[in-house]
Amino acid sequence: MNKTIDREDIIGARVAKLDAPEKVTGRTRYINDMVLPRMLRAKIFRTDRVHAKILKIDTSKAEALPGVVAVITGVDAPDGKIGVIKDNPPLKKDKVRCIRDELAAVAAETEEICDAALRLIEVEYEDLPPVFTCEDALKPGAPVIEVDRPDNIAMAQDFSAGDIAEGEKASDHIVEGKYNVHYVTHCNMGVSCCLADISVDGKVTLYSQSQYPYIMKMDLAPALGIHPGDLRIIQPPVGGAFGSKLDVYPYEPICVLLARKTGRPVKLEFSREEEFIASPTRQPVEFRIRAGMTSDGIFTFRDISTLLNNGGYTSWGATTPYVTMRTCSSHYVVPHIRYSARAVYTNNPYAGSFRGYGNVQATWMLETHVDKMAEVAGLDPLEIRLRNANQPHSMTPQGSNLGCIDLVGCIKISAEKSDFLKKWNAYSAQWDNGERYKRGIGIATSLHNAGGAKIHKSDGCGTILTMDDYARVTVMTGASDIGQGSDTVIAQIVAQELGVPLRDITVINNDTALGPWDVGVHASRTTYIAGNSAKRAALDARNQILAAAEKQSNVTADQLDLRGGHVVQADNGEVVIETGRLLRQMHFAGEDAKLVMATDYYEPPTEPEDENHMGDMSAAYSHAAHVAEIIVDTHTGEIEIEKIWSVQDVGKIINLNGLEGQIEGGIAMGIGYGLHEDLKIEKGIVQNPAFRDYHVVTAPEMPPIDMAFIETDDHEGPAGAKGIAELPTIVIAPALGNALYNATGVRIDHPPLNPEKVARAIWERSNKNDAE
Amino acid sequence: MPHKVDIAFTLNGRPVAAAVPVSASALQVMNRDFDLTSAKLACGEGECGACTILLDGVSRNSCLTPGVDLDGRDVETVEGLWTGNGMDLLQDAFVEAGAVQCGFCTPGMVMQAKFLLAPGKKLTRDHVLRGLEGNVCRCTGYHKIVDAIVAASGETS
Ligand code: FES
Ligand code: FES
């Protein structure tokens, strides 16, 4: 009898990331590390005003500095603008609208010379009246920021379903609230950096940290005055992105313009201070909500209006309402909905996309509010959520079929594991016991798209798969891996279909001249969309191999399998032929010669929203629940997180290591959002542009996390998987806020829950109690 | 031309020499004079640990260490832990534990971990969490990094 090989399942295993060995040995080359021959360095001259007319920019002294090769201003740039509604000229000529504004840029032999040259640039301004809040910017006669928008409204979204008046009639209680969520920023460890190179015939190669390289070509080309086809984006590994690179920002066209002016490669890298000031932020939002319920705590209506401080220009922050709206309309069952959003120009910095995208903000508001409603209804936090929970395969007011979700499971398991109810009852009885340290426990949940989001005409991803004579596989995918581990997931999916070891697979994803199209890495879509495309390409290759094997043996293709680098009989694992050998035979077969290659373009079965915001824009949806137990020092206001329980519907686990890593990392980011991260902006100026004053979570602050996963097995997802990486960042902050209330009786509606705020609120509460 | 100073030191086990500007940081010296890019500039202010190296066995933020201070010292970077053969046990542990995402903090983390492991004792999670306080990671949530270091400490003790 021949050798036999058992079936091995690599889906769901704990797999080491393919890029990890290069990274732990310091061999990975980020753009920040790259040097090309004759490369120049570049720096941007930014304004120190928030709203001013530019009268004169004098760069003559900078140009005369030895070592300076080129200085450019807006007059050297094409007229094309960037941003979601094309309101942002990369180099400003006429007026500045916020603190980061780019007025000039220098290319020189060294960074030191660039810095010296920047100090020699002189600008004359005429200050204009500034405006910093939405409220002020909406007043009649307010300063106008963008001439084309005299009302200062950059973007508006409205949705309604049912009839609010009817909802009010059906309500026994109406609970109102106001929540302002703040500015935070990505803090990628690798600062923004790009490197541009121009060919003799005017084509542009840009080494970029972009998360959406294919669409970027279209967005960037007008600012360069070239055809999008003449732009090639290469994506070396990036030091984190988290949504921050989902748009074109001025530094990239500026870098290309300098390369074009000098005919030399130019690299432009931010300082950390610049990263804080000149990167997009998370979108701040002012929420107003009125929500009704019956005496049994059954939700009747939700009326939510939001104002978004748009800052001086319009990037993806202004579009976050598309996601905020989904949570507001569809998280829990609510028959009558009204939602509105206005993004309002001000002279503040502007926001972009950031992991959780509009849902971090929405979930803070909604999950805090639901806890308040529970109290009014006399229900515990679990009961109100369970009574109103979304059910599998239900239809949302915006026309999404939620498919195989399990919100109820998420709530029940997290509550059971944390012994929630017992603790919750005990802790809320201790508010006034005079103890300094108080315990609290809180829960929050959310709903998020988990199978892409069709915000463009296509939400697809392509794959080109080839196999060589030794059964080594090259997978060219459109998907971008920004450190989250999608290359490894794609390799696992392909390895499973083709029965080859993981190390025999090379994933290439970093060059728009090689890879097929993809929308970009956002919306928790890569595992789902790119994974599906890779799976379909691998299946195609598998069928080609098995068809050839069928010809060679007397076994039909459907009774063959690929395992451990061999073609085997599916029933008993008996080896038929080594896969590499079969591939060579196929290759060197004279006139019948055939190479195994496969291409695929996967377009998920979804639809873009129509003008009424109706449409099933994601191929899958998912929920998570987080429970947080905390200890509050009522004297200092400090919150220590004792433990977090996280339960998430993941569809199906593909790489357990990667999944846990995304959950932990997402929670760390969400803790920062909830407890202390705060980009302080006063009169348009960033007050804390340094790690020492902007507090990201450090190792000793990370609590233990107990994780559980629910496998709902999505019928469309690759091997049943769903996208998972945003929910952990979305859910944790309101769980912390709800725990604070459970511990102290103090509610803080506007995050972060920093010690000053918490201590003051506790003090105010005890003063009030004393007075009564 | 900034004033330059001649220095000589041991870099990843080999003697080296360079003439460095007095204004250059150790990080710049390693990057510009020796083409080492593992230690990363992520803040330049001693606030993130991405630039961590070992100086006479002690972890230091190389962005704040003057380059001239390297003179006569023993300097180690991540590049010294892998020279074409097997990876260091600690590096293996990072790979296996899933301690790496974008990887930008990783070389600094590995060097800080080397420092924590130097006494050769089995480390507790708490000890490691506190020992990593100066090393920021924006991706991982730290636990998997701690898993790696604790696992490696078991092996080396
Ligand atoms: S780069 Fe040295 S501590 Fe951040
Ligand atoms: S792995 Fe990205 S910063 Fe640590």
Image (tube, helix red, strand yellow):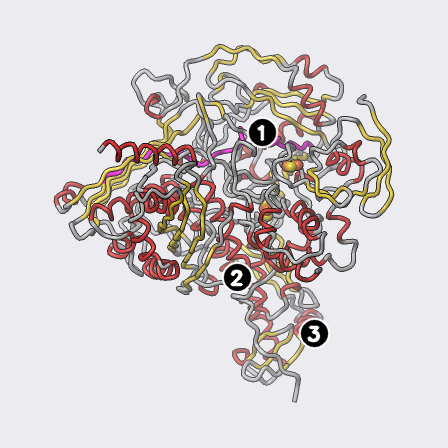
Question: Could you tell me which residue is drawn at 70 percent across and 67 percent down?
Answer: A469
Q: Are marks 3 and 2 on the same chain?
A: yes
- Depth check, front residue: A71 or A285: A285
Q: Is residue A505 magenta?
A: no
* Relative horizontal placement of residue A584, taking residue A383 as reference (left or right): right
Q: Mark 3 or mark 2: name the one nearer the start of the chain.
A: 3
Residue A656, numbered circle: 2
Residue A581, numbered circle: 3
Q: Mark 3 or mark 1: name the one nearer the start of the chain.
A: 1
Secondary structure beneath disc 3?
helix
Dot 1 beta carbon under 8 Å from ligand 1: no
Looking at the rendered structure, the kind of residue marked 1 is Glu
Dot 2 beta carbon under 8 Å from ligand 2: no
Q: Which residue is mark 1?
A: A273
Looking at the rendered structure, the kind of residue marked 2 is Leu
* Relative horizontal placement of residue A470, taking residue A299 as reference (left or right): right
- Depth check, front residue: A655 or A44: A655
Pointer 2 chain: A
Secondary structure beneath disc 2?
helix
